[in-house]
Amino acid sequence: MKKLSLWVSVIIIALSVNACKNNKHDSVSKADSLNKVKDTTKSLSIAVERVDAEFTVKAASGSMTEVELGKLAQQKGVSKQVKNFGAMMVTDHSKINDFIKALAVTKNISIPKAPGAREQKAISKLAGKSGKAFDKAYINSMIDDHKADIKLFETAAKKCLDPDVKSFAVKTLPVLQEHLDAINAIKDSME
């Protein structure tokens, strides 16, 4: 048993060091690496399968991104509709983030502490815009993001194995659809 514990510790340390070297700024990759170690070492009794952990990591990164972009919309948006939508994103996705954190703790899933590298680029790109150009880019980004989120959550609702992770996906889908409907309405009203 001591040999197994030592072996597991060595693997975790090696993977963590490697992940830090290769992905210094990508918390999503770090979380995925930690979850892969947990998944392959069944003696640690990970509470969920890899598909559930990967979904939870993506959901966490995406939801944190929505909060950051929502804050930007409140600061940089010109249209009152864009500012209000940004406020809704901060409120709703902060609640989703809190739920994801609690779920991750109970399921022994490592989640990112910040949006992933790809998401950070999107945040930076929008932060560089202002005025009506910001509003237009933000609206288009929210439409694309929510379409992708809905697809991710629909897949999770079908393929995730853990009932709590699956339930989270199912319960969050209507909120994401409401967001997509709202941002599409804003886009239509501004054309």
Image: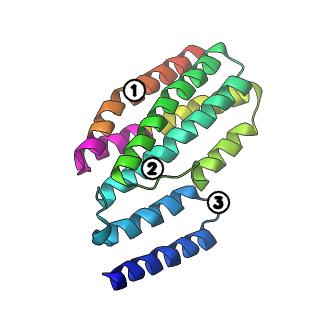
Name the chief secondary structure element in magenta: helix
Question: In terms of sequence position, does the residue under pointer 1 or pointer 2 come before the other?
Answer: 2
Question: In terms of sequence position, does the residue under pointer 3 or pointer 2 come before the other?
Answer: 3
Q: Position of residue 148 (x, y in %)?
A: 43, 42
Task: Rate crowding at label 1 as few (under 14), some (14 to 19) or many (20 or more) other CA atoms within 10 Å.
Answer: some
Residue positioned 37% across, 43% down in the render: 103
Q: Which residue is mark 2?
A: 58
Task: Rate crowding at label 3 as few (under 14), some (14 to 19) or many (20 or more) other CA atoms within 10 Å.
Answer: some
Q: Magenta stretch?
A: 149-166
Left or right of 187? Residue 150 is: left
Up-down: is 51 above or below 142?
below
Q: Quadrant of residue 96?
A: top left
Circle 1: residue type: Val
Up-down: is 46 above or below 185?
below
Q: Which residue is mark 3?
A: 25
Q: Position of residue 73 (x, y in %)?
A: 66, 27
Depth check, front residue: 150 or 112: 112
Question: In terms of sequence position, does the residue under pointer 1 or pointer 3 come before the other?
Answer: 3
Q: Does the residue at mark 1 contact the one at mark 3 (Cβ under 8 Å)? A: no
Q: Which residue is mark 1?
A: 175
Instruction: Verify whether residue 153 appears in magenta.
Output: yes
Instruction: Verify whether residue 160 appears in magenta.
Output: yes
Left or right of 128? Residue 56 is: left
